[in-house]
Amino acid sequence: MKLKVVVLCFLFSMNLFSQDEVQKAEPDWDESIAFHGGFGVQKSLFAELGISKFSLMEVGYFPISKSIYTSVEFSPTLKSDEENHIYGLKVGCEFNAFIVSVALEAKYQTDFKDNDFVITPKIGFGTFGVITFYYGFNISTGDRPFSRMGNHQFSIVCNLNKKILSM
């Protein structure tokens, strides 16, 4: 009986060591340069336009996307005799799993009189990172010099690349 157990253990261990290492196939990210644009409101209206490095991957039926982007932001004023337009330069990253999205962006805002550096964490939902509706909270590092820029931000953001436009 003891001999049978030893032989079975020996055969089992030989089987383990003789197998080739199984390589798990990791899904590949489909990366492309994409148009990054959007509009929203944060007390006043704003629009943004830029580019992103957009990556999309499907794990089974579960789409995941990520992007790193840079864009310029414009917040116009209707009272140009009292206040200036506000311009922003921003960088950010987004991560989307199925319909849930999270993002973090940093932007420098100026009206060429005052300026501010703002960090905005965002959460939202959308279609695989292509079109996303976000809620963001603006964290000012300069004591909020612009009265038209509120704490809360609601926006719609698009990442459109050649592959998505050809569908």
Image (cartoon, helix red, strand yellow):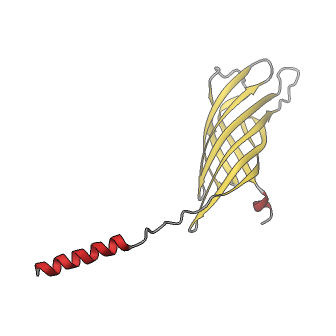
Quadrant in which the C terminus appears: bottom right
Q: Looking at this view, name the residue that lies furthest to the left.
A: 1
Query: In the image, 80: left or right of 115?
Result: right
Name which residue lies at 78% across and 40% down. Answer: 47
Residue at x 75%, y 61% (from the top left corner): 164
Residue 111 pos. (x, y %) = 79, 23
Image side of residue 97 versus residue 6, left or right: right
Vertical order, 93 against 64 (above or below): above
Asked whether the viewer can see residue 138, the reply is no
Position of residue 87 measured from the top left corner of the image (x, y, whole percent): 79, 30
Furthest toward the right, the residue is 81
Work out which residue is located at the far top of the displayed protein and give it: 113
Q: Nearer the viewer, residue 13 or 104?
A: 13
Q: Please give the name of the residue rendered at 65% of the width and 20% of the height, measured from the top-left corner.
A: 142
* Rendering quarter of residue 99: bottom right
Q: Nearer the viewer, residue 22 or 106?
A: 22
Q: Nearer the viewer, residue 26 or 51?
A: 26
State the residue at coordinates (76%, 51%). 34
Q: Is residue 122 visible?
A: yes
Residue 78 image position (x, y, % from top left)? 86, 30
Q: Name the quarter where the N terminus is drawn.
A: bottom left
Q: Nearer the viewer, residue 50 or 22?
A: 22
Based on the displayed image, in which of its 4 quarters is residue 5 positioned? bottom left
Q: How many marks?
A: 0
Displayed quadrant of residue 10: bottom left
